[in-house]
Structure formats: structure tokens, C-alpha cells
Amino acid sequence: MRHFFYYLASFVVALFFICIGIMFCFLPDSQAKIDTLTQFMLQNPWLSYLGSILFIAMGAAILINIKLNLKKQSYKIRTGGLLACLDERIFEQYVDTYWKDLFPKNQVTSHVTIRKNKLHIEADLPYVPLSEQKPLLEQIEKDLNEILIKYLGYTQEYLISINFNHASAV
């Protein structure tokens, strides 16, 4: 849902600038066009109200998008009578350290998010020959599972999405 508001706001802002740009391209040509535009707006006040509502909606969508993106994502772990709250950045730090250990000569782009109290890990790994990918994926799953349980106490199911770069990207 977060991405929807971002794309909506971006689309509306882009459309706004395109329309204003087109309008300013034609306005300097003649005073008559400026007068016609002014008369049109004065004779159709509903157009001004519609424009106002659109600008207010666009501003609200941008504010909602900002609010959603600032929301902290954390995972709550209850052990005994204690409750621990782990920020997704902690998970991301452990995962990034793992990628650096696994691929010391390559930069691995990864992203960790928590949605509905479930961990999602996405990673773009460097090129690995097809015959070696399955054993590597099994090892990654085993290692990440161990890290999540041993260091962070995360015993829930998690989703991992891994993409391997093509040989030409090496």
C-alpha cells in the first residue's frame, strides 16, 4: 500500500508540472489567450473548486505517504515475562554482515522488511553458475535460519527472495 501512495503522488506531481509547462508555453503568445483563460475560470467556478480539491488531495496523499514511510517497523519477541522489540535495521545489519562474509569480494544489495510481524529478506547476489545455485541457496537458508534463531531469537517463518546476477554482469 505504501508504494501506491508514492506512485500516486509522483504521478500527480509529474502531471501537474507537465500541464503547467504546456500552459506557460502557450500563454505568452497573446494577451487574448490570457484573457480567455481568466474569463473561462471566472465563468466556471466549479473548475476552480475541482482544482482546489485535487491539490488538497495531492497534498494529503503526499503527507500520508510520508507518514507511512516514517513508521518504524519492528518485531516483538516475548520470552518468559519479557517483551523485546527488534527494529528491522537490526535484522538488516545481521543479514548484511552475512552477505559480506559469504561474498567478501562482491557487493550484495539486500533489503529486510517486516510486514504483518513476518520477516521478508530480498537480496541480489553476484553471479553463481547454475549448477552451484541450489546448494548455495540451501546453505543460505540454513545459515540465515541459524543467525535469526541464535542471535535474534527469531523463530517464526520468514520469506527470502534471492536473485542471481547474470554472467554478463560480472
Image (cartoon, rainbow, N blue to C red):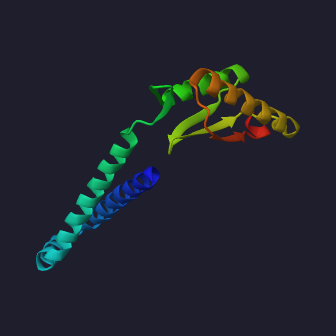
- Residue at figure coordinates x 44%, y 56% from the top left: 4
Is residue 92 placed above or below 25 in the rendered structure?
above
The percent coordinates of residue 107 (x first, y second) are: 65, 27
**Which residue sits furthest front?**
80
The percent coordinates of residue 89 (x first, y second) are: 49, 28
> Is residue 105 visible in the rendered structure shown here?
no
Q: How many marks?
A: 0
**Which residue sits furthest right?**
131
Quarter of the image for residue 32 reads bottom left
- Residue at figure coordinates x 51%, y 44% from the top left: 115
Please indicate whether residue 22 sits to the left or right of residue 39 in the image.
Answer: right
Pick whichever, 25 or 110, lies toward us. Answer: 110
> Is residue 64 visible in the rendered structure shown here?
yes
The N terminus - image quarter: bottom left
The percent coordinates of residue 10 (x first, y second) are: 39, 53
Pick whichever, 42 or 161, lies toward us. Answer: 161
The C terminus - image quarter: top right
- Residue at figure coordinates x 77%, y 39% from the top left: 168
The percent coordinates of residue 153 (x first, y second) are: 58, 26
Please indicate whether residue 30 sits to the left or right of residue 130 in the image.
Answer: left
- Residue at figure coordinates x 28%, y 67% from the top left: 26
Is residue 117 placed above or below 79 in the rendered structure?
below
Please indicate whether residue 133 sits to the left or right of residue 41 in the image.
Answer: right
Is residue 155 placed above or below 16 in the rendered structure?
above
